[in-house]
Amino acid sequence: MCGMEYKIDATNKKLGRLASEIAVILQGKKEASYEPRLSGKDTVIVENVGKLAFSGGKFEKKKYYWHTGYMGHLREATLKELFTKNPANVLKMSVVRMLPKNSLNSKRIKRLIIK
């Protein structure tokens, strides 16, 4: 029942490329017995998230938006603000957004361990 355990060192890796690699592993697409209707079995452990690299001017210019649910409460924060507060959250957020939006999403993201 246990799948493989992938250990990834995030030092000097680009955020988007790392997140897409993790999303592929969590979906189970690296297994020979891949099936889209199953959540997969592989676990991903990511280390040194604070040493991620960003290309271009993304670190200063990229903005994240979310809505609180109240009228006029559209919030925004730059990548720099979010990354200095919690780098693991930035990686997890980008992986979640790369996974398919279905009922397996929560099962897959639980197999992502960020140290």
Image (cartoon, rainbow, N blue to C red):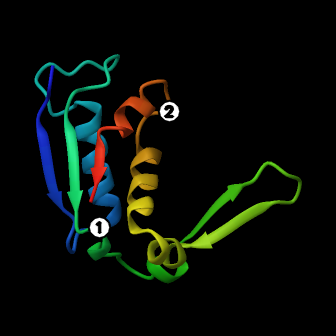
Relative depth, front residue between 44 and 38: 44
Name the element at disc 2: loop
Q: Position of residue 97 (x, y in %)?
A: 47, 47
How many marks are shown on the rendered structure? 2
Residue at figure coordinates x 11%, y 35% from the top left: 4
Residue at figure coordinates x 38%, y 30% from the top left: 107
Question: How would you rate the neighbour count of disc 1 (Cα within 10 Å): few for under 14, some for 14-19, many for 20 or more?
Answer: many
Q: Position of residue 25 (x, y in %)?
A: 22, 39
Q: Position of residue 78 (x, y in %)?
A: 57, 74
Q: Which residue is mark 1?
A: 49
Residue at figure coordinates x 32%, y 54% from the top left: 19
Q: Which residue is mark 2?
A: 101
Residue at figure coordinates x 27%, y 60% from the top left: 115
In the rendered structure, are the residues bearing label 2 and label 1 in contact, judged by CB atoms less than 8 Å apart?
A: no
- Of circles 2 and 1, the one toward us is 1
Disc 2 residue type?
Lys
Q: Is residue 16 left or right of residue 66?
A: left
**Distance of mark 2 from mark 1, alpha carbons?**
25 Å
Residue 61 sits in quarter: bottom right
Quadrant where the N terminus sits is top left
Relative depth, front residue between 115 and 11: 115
Q: Is residue 11 above or below residue 109?
A: below
Q: Is residue 29 above or below residue 15?
A: above
For marks 2 and 1, the one nearer the N-term is 1
Relative depth, front residue between 114 and 67: 114
Q: Is residue 87 left or right of residue 80?
A: left
Question: How would you rate the neighbour count of disc 2 (Cα within 10 Å): few for under 14, some for 14-19, many for 20 or more?
Answer: few
